[in-house]
Image (cartoon, helix red, strand yellow):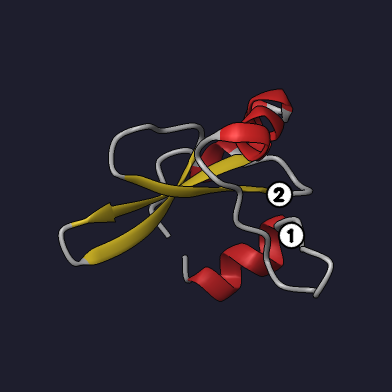
Amino acid sequence: MTYKEWEEKYSPVKNSMGCVREFDTTGPDFLEVQAANPDTVWTECCEGESWYIYPGLRFCNRMCYYITEKPCLSEDKDAAI
């Protein structure tokens, strides 16, 4: 799945400027991520020179988190966007 397909399928939360909101890995943002439905949390990770978005809360190589309006479907539980 491409980033655009993911964005259309799961509707990530937007910031006040209408852009996809990136939640920080610490502080109030991380508290908000922890309080969210786990099926709506996605983690952006850096692996070498590549960047991926994985469903769920991850800690290794994490750059930021996303929260989506729609929960991750079982068919996408192993997806890397």
Q: Is residue 35 left or right of residue 4?
A: right
Closer to the chain start, of discs 1 and 2, is 1
Quick one: which residue is furthest to the left in this view? Answer: 48
The answer to whether residue 28 is left or right of residue 78 is: right
**What amino acid is labelled 2 in the image?**
Thr
- Mark 2 crowd level (few <14, some 14–19, many ≥20, 10 Å Cα): many
Q: Residue at 49%, 49% (x, y): give it.
A: 64
Residue 72: x and y in percent read: 62, 41
Q: Is residue 8 above or below residue 53?
A: below
Q: Residue at (56%, 36%) from the top-left corner?
A: 74
**Quadrant of image for the C terminus:** bottom left
Circle 1: residue type: Ser
Q: What residue do we see at 69% from left, 55% from top? A: 10
Residue 7 vertical position relative to residue 45 in the rendered view, above or below: below
Residue position marked by numbered label 1 in the rendering: 11
Residue placed most toward the observer, 22 or 55: 22
Percent position (x, y) of residue 16? Answer: 84, 67
Q: Is residue 78 left or right of residue 15?
A: left
Disc 1 crowd, CA 10 A, few/some/many (<14, 14-19, 20+)? some
- In this view, which residue lies farthest toward the right? 16
Q: Position of residue 3 (x, y in %)?
A: 51, 70
Residue at image point 47% right, 71% down: 2
Circles 1 and 2: CB atoms closer than 8 Å: yes
User: Residue 18: x percent and y percent?
Assistant: 80, 74
Q: Secondary structure at mark 2?
A: loop
Does residue 63 lie above or below 36 as drawn?
below
Q: Is disc 1 placed on a helix, strand or loop?
A: loop
Separation of residues labelled 1 and 2 (CA atoms):
5 Å
Name the residue carrying label 2: 68
Image quarter of residue 17: bottom right
